[in-house]
Each structure stands twice: as structure tokens, then as C-alpha cells.
Image (spheres, grey):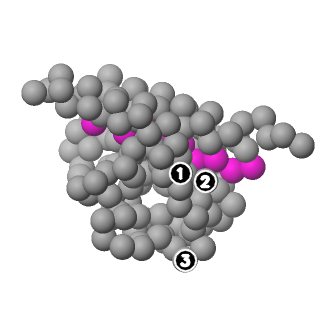
Amino acid sequence: MLEPFDDSYFMKQALQEALKGEEEGEVPVGAVIVAQNRIIARAHNLTETLNDVTAHAETQVITAAAGAIGGKYLKGCTLYVTLEPCVMCAGALYWSQIDRVVFGARDEKRGAACKGDLYHPKTKVQGGVLAEECAKILTDFFEKRR
């Protein structure tokens, strides 16, 4: 049986979140968490809005998903995020015990992969889903700001 949604579909939802963040003056990174093929949480960066360096899309969506399921562990869930998680976010994802992390653009300077294997041993990580689209939104944002 074919699943009605795939990784590209959910990454497009994360891209929509990134665009919402950009409209608010945030660095355009968006995220969604999916459980049983259904989005249970959506978020984008809020570091400028909240004046909080920890308010990355990932931390915001982890909190929202935990509220949606009524528990702190995100077993059975998948995170879709437009940019590879940083070390801080990888740590938060480790503690959430999320099953899967799917990201779009790689972050060569600050991505978790630069520091080794930081995710929970059972977490599967996949990068490069809609990587060009995810990278372009960030490149365009920073070009406009310069």
C-alpha cells in the first residue's frame, strides 16, 4: 500500500514554515514533526521575536509536539527541518528520543555532523531532501540582508 505522503511532501510543509519565519524577520528555518503520517507540530525560528538564542525551529517544534502527544519522548515521530540541526538542537533531539530526523540543506559550518554523532543511537538521520530549495531560501534571505 502506498503512503499518501512522502518526505518531499513533509519537507515542503517545513519550507512553508520557513517562509512564515522570514516574513517575521527570522532566519528562514522551518520544521514539522510527523506521527503516523500526520503533522502534529509546526514551527519556525523565533530567535529574533523572543530575543532568545535557543528558540530555533527544532526546539520550538519539539516543545509543540510534546504538548500535542502529552509526553516528552517523541518515539514514533519524524522531524522534517529545512536546515541540518546544530549541536544544541541535536542534543535536544537526542533527549526527545525521536525516531527520525530528515533535513534539507546541510550546514557545513554549524551542523551537528561537523561534531560527530550527536543523535540518539536509535535515531535515523537523512539529509538532502529538497536540499536545493531549502538552501536557496537561506541564500536569498542573507543576500537581501547584505
The image quarter in which residue 17 lies: top left
Image quadrant holding the N terminus, namely: top right
Q: In whole angstroms, how far apart are the C-alphas of marks 3 and 1?
A: 15 Å
Q: Earlier in the sequence, mark 1 or mark 2?
A: 2
Residue 91 in view: yes
Q: Is residue 99 above or below residue 48?
A: below
Q: Where is residue 93 in the image (x, y as percent from the top left)?
A: 47, 64
Badge 2 element: strand
In the image, taking residue 90 as reference, residue 41 lies left or right, namely: right
Q: Mark 3 points at which residue?
A: 121
Give, as a three-letter code, the residue at label 2.
Thr
The image quarter in which residue 111 lies: bottom left
Q: In whole angstroms, how far apart are the C-alphas of marks 2 and 3?
A: 15 Å
Q: Is residue 25 above or below residue 73?
A: above
Badge 3 element: loop
- Residue contact at pointers 1 and 2, CB within 8 angstroms: yes
The mark tally for this picture is 3
In the image, taking residue 99 as reference, residue 36 lies left or right, namely: right
The image quarter in which residue 39 lies: top right
Name the disc covering residue 102, or none.
Answer: 1
Q: Position of residue 22 (x, y in %)?
A: 32, 27
Give, as a three-letter code, the residue at label 1.
Val
Image quadrant holding the C terminus, namely: top left
Q: Residues within 10 Å of mark 2 (few under 14, many from 20)?
A: many
Q: Name the residue under label 2.
A: 78
- The residue under the point 41% across, 64% down is 90
* Extent of the magenta region: 26-36
Q: How crowded is mark 1: few (under 14 residues within 10 Å), some or many (20 or more)?
A: many
Give, as a three-letter code, the residue at label 3.
Pro
- The residue under the point 60% across, 73% down is 122
